[in-house]
Amino acid sequence: MPTESPKPLRADAVRNIEKIVRAARDVYAEQGPDAGLDEIARRAGVGIATLFRRFPDKAALLRAVLEQQFTHEVLPAIERGLDDEDPRRGLSVVIEAALTSAADEHHVLTAARNAGIFTAETSARFFDALDPLVVRGQQAGVIREDLVPDDLKRIMGMLVSVLWTMDPAEGGWRRYVTLVLDGLTPAAASPLPNPAPPLLRRQPNQGRPRPACPAGPIPPDRLDPEHESGPGPGPGPGGLSA
């Protein structure tokens, strides 16, 4: 029996959703990962009942914020990278856009991690977009041939973790993007001693990890060694979000 398609939202409902998501990004940026939904509703100019009508809980709102972040900031960079004639430069464009987004939205990422909404699916679009850039670079001889997808997921996890050792707004993380990209070039390559091991994700309060995909488009979840011990070192606010 066919099911009815959901009715399209009215224009005012769409506007309210946009205002709530934009307000959420602003409030998290100003107040940190523990920002309250009441303040987000107030900043958006809607009642708390309207916010809950569109987003039944904080996790739903954070998913919408991450989707907007990816759509507005990372997806255009992926398209530019794929269009770039230089595959190494195209890969650099995408990685830098992802890290810029993570630096700008570090409180949102921390709140999303705390809410447990990072899954393999949240990262799939990002890493699926990187794969053809890497393959194109390998075919052109500008990316080392032994780089595999799991390597890139770990590399992104390491680069994101760098953000929490400095003031993310200062852009010092770009130094490490250049160092990593130089290490991916065939001219700098040494034979790798082992194949890429399975990705592991620690479970809360468990010492034994299990195989898993990294979470989050930006960042892979729980790849940092201090994840279970609280905030990370340095001036990075809110603790590590990787």
Image (spheres, rainbow, N blue to C red):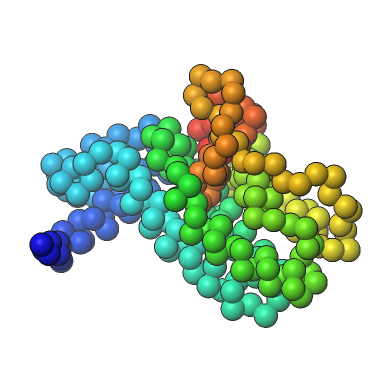
> Looking at the picture, does residue 9 appear above or below residue 20?
below
| Residue in the image at 13% along x and 42% along y | 49
- Work out whether residue 175 or residue 223 is closer to the camera in this orientation and state it: 223
- Work out whether residue 171 or residue 129 is closer to the camera in this orientation and state it: 129
Q: Position of residue 230 (x, y in %)?
A: 54, 24
Query: Quarter of the image containing the C terminus?
Result: top right
Drawn side of residue 100 relative to residue 109, left or right: right
Q: Position of residue 187 (x, y in %)?
A: 88, 63
Q: How many marks?
A: 0
Query: Quarter of the image containing the N terminus?
Result: bottom left
Q: Position of residue 96 (x, y in %)?
A: 62, 59
> Looking at the picture, does residue 123 appear above or below residue 223?
below
| Residue in the image at 53% along x and 49% along y | 218
| Residue in the image at 64% along x and 41% along y | 198
- Using the rendered image of the protein, determine whether residue 235 is visible from the camera's viewpoint: no
Drawn side of residue 76 relative to residue 211, left or right: left
- Using the rendered image of the protein, determine whether residue 34 is visible from the camera's viewpoint: yes
| Residue in the image at 54% along x and 40% along y | 212
Q: Which residue occupies the extreme front position in the image?
A: 1
> Looking at the picture, does residue 62 appear above or below residue 83?
above
- Work out whether residue 74 or residue 135 is closer to the camera in this orientation and state it: 135
